[in-house]
Image: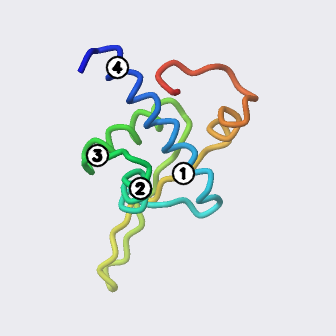
Amino acid sequence: MSRALDTAEHEELRLEILELCREAQPYGTNPNVLRAALRKSGHEISERELLTQVDYLKDKGLVETQEVVNRRLAINRLIVRLTAAGTDYLEGNGPDIAGVG
């Protein structure tokens, strides 16, 4: 795949992740749910690739992550939530952000 197509695909994927996080507000969602939803829309990506894209969006200030742990119940989950800046971006109230479709 050409570099331009690869870049465009990543930008589209990041935008879709943001949209899914908006649908999951205010509670957020986890990577397994994100992957399942992305798969239904034609994006077949690994967990590693998804976490790479989530970290990218986090570095841009568009999402935040929180690790939820309950040792007694053996629960260890990563929760991904849209930030206010992410909401502004999706609503068109913020600046264009390079790397996000």
Tell me the distance, in whole angstroms, between the alpha carbons under discs 4 and 3: 16 Å
Q: Does label 2 or label 4 sit earlier along the sequence?
A: 4
Q: Secondary structure at mark 4?
A: helix
Count residues near mark 2 (Cα–Cα under 10 Å), then give few for <14, some for 14-19, many for 20+: few
Instruction: Give the label, 1 or 2, closer to the camera.
Output: 2
Residue beneath the point at 29% across and 80% down: 74
**Residue 32 pos. (x, y %):** 36, 61
For label 2, the residue is 40
Instruction: Give the label, 4 or 3, closer to the camera.
Output: 4
For label 3, the residue is 45
For label 4, the residue is 5
Instruction: Report if the CB atoms under discs 3 and 2 are less than 8 Å apart.
Output: no
**Residue 56 pos. (x, y %):** 41, 33
Three-letter code, disc 1: Leu
Reply above or below: 34 against 11.
below
Three-letter code, disc 4: Leu
Q: Quadrant of residue 11?
A: top left
Q: Does label 3 or label 1 sit earlier along the sequence?
A: 1
Q: Which mark is residue 20?
A: 1
Q: Camera-side residue: 21 or 68?
A: 21
Q: Residue furthest bottom?
A: 72
Residue beneath the point at 54% across and 34% down: 61
